[in-house]
Image: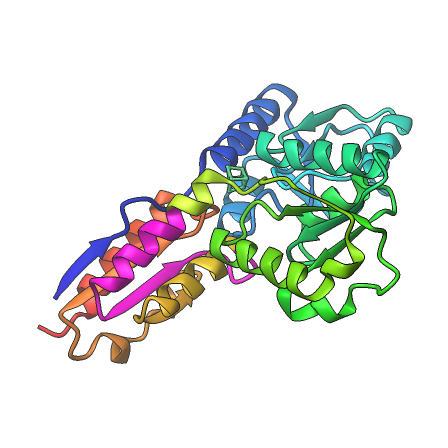
Amino acid sequence: MEILLAKEMGFCWGVRRAISMMEKAVSERGQIISLGPIVHNPQVVAALAEKGIQVTSSIDGVSGVPLAIAAHGVGPKVLEEAKAKGLEIIDTTCPIVTRSQRWAKKMAEDGFTVIVYGDADHREVKGVLSWAQGKGIALTEEALDSLPQELSSRVAIIPQTTQSPARFAAFIGRLLRERLAQISELQVVNTLCDVTASQQAAARELAQGVELVLVIGGHNSANSRHLAEACREAGAETHHIETAAEVEAQWLTGRERVGITAGASTPDWAVEEVVRCVRGLAPK
Ligand code: SF4
């Protein structure tokens, strides 16, 4: 059985940058607390906890320890609260996410209703929406019907950075078809991340040449879920796994070519473990 790896996969530069900033900070200060997991990958979070990087879900109980903001970023209120508490802030927000936040703020100030195309429960989307200061809404194509009828006639759309370009384009098309009569001015800002788009393209290419794809990434990682969707759309049987322990021997039966890809929050060692596991389980 042949194992093929996607041409582009795994930790993106934004996550590598965030982890390296936090590792440097913890080596200098001894301990830091990250607001929310550093990445959507429990194994990476556990490895960093051993180095002294703890995780909290709220800044309420934090005092006397530097507070790290993860790559997904936060809203302005959180930053103000942290400053009011006198906390040192280590801001590792990915510059691409910062760009989204700035656009959301600017478009809201310019009088647009800001639609963030993405998952309303995702931390990046929540953060970006808070920069729109009450003038934003998160939507996906499935929830388009929930867009208020009394929408402002000036609409701005930005995507969650990890969304698929094709789906984002389809969303804009559907919004225009269904709501054009209500829209006098439309501004679209492309805040999609190149890393995500190229990893998705590489995943699709991989999926077209194999019978089975294993997508490695946290089950709570939107980016990894989108990679799995891209592989399924390309026609390959696809399993989204977090660790090598989830690989089932029966998936490999009768396969000649198995593809492996990984989300932007998946470290190289997790990929190597899955490759070793698949080699070990492959029918001899
Ligand atoms: S996937 Fe893109 S936007 Fe997200 S952290 Fe990585 S580089 Fe930044």
In the image, residue 208 lies in the stretch drawn in magenta: yes
Image point (54%, 28%), residue name? 23
User: Is residue 233 or residue 11 the one in the foreground?
Assistant: 233
Relative to residue 146, is residue 251 drawn left or right? left
Q: Quadrant of residue 245?
A: bottom left
Quadrant into which the C terminus falls: bottom left
> On screen, 251 above or below 22?
below
Front position in the image: 170 or 228 = 170
Image quadrant holding the N terminus, namely: bottom left
Q: Residue furthest right?
A: 84
Quarter-wise, where is residue 277 in the image? bottom left
Nearer-the-camera pick, 262 or 106: 106
Q: How many marks?
A: 0
Q: Residue at x 62, y 48 (%)?
A: 159
Highlighted range, magenta:
199-222
Residue 154 visible to the viewer? yes
User: Residue furthest toward the top?
Assistant: 28
* Residue 172 spot, x, y in % from top left: 61, 55
Residue 21's place in the image compared with 224, above or below, is above
Residue 232 in the image, given as x and y percentages of width and height: 37, 69
- For image coordinates 46% across by 33% down, the residue present is 13
Q: What percent of the width, then of the height, locates residue 201?
A: 35, 51
Residue at x-position 42% and y-position 58%: 227
Q: x, y percentage for residue 282?
A: 17, 70
Q: Taking 149 as reference, is 67 above or below it?
A: above
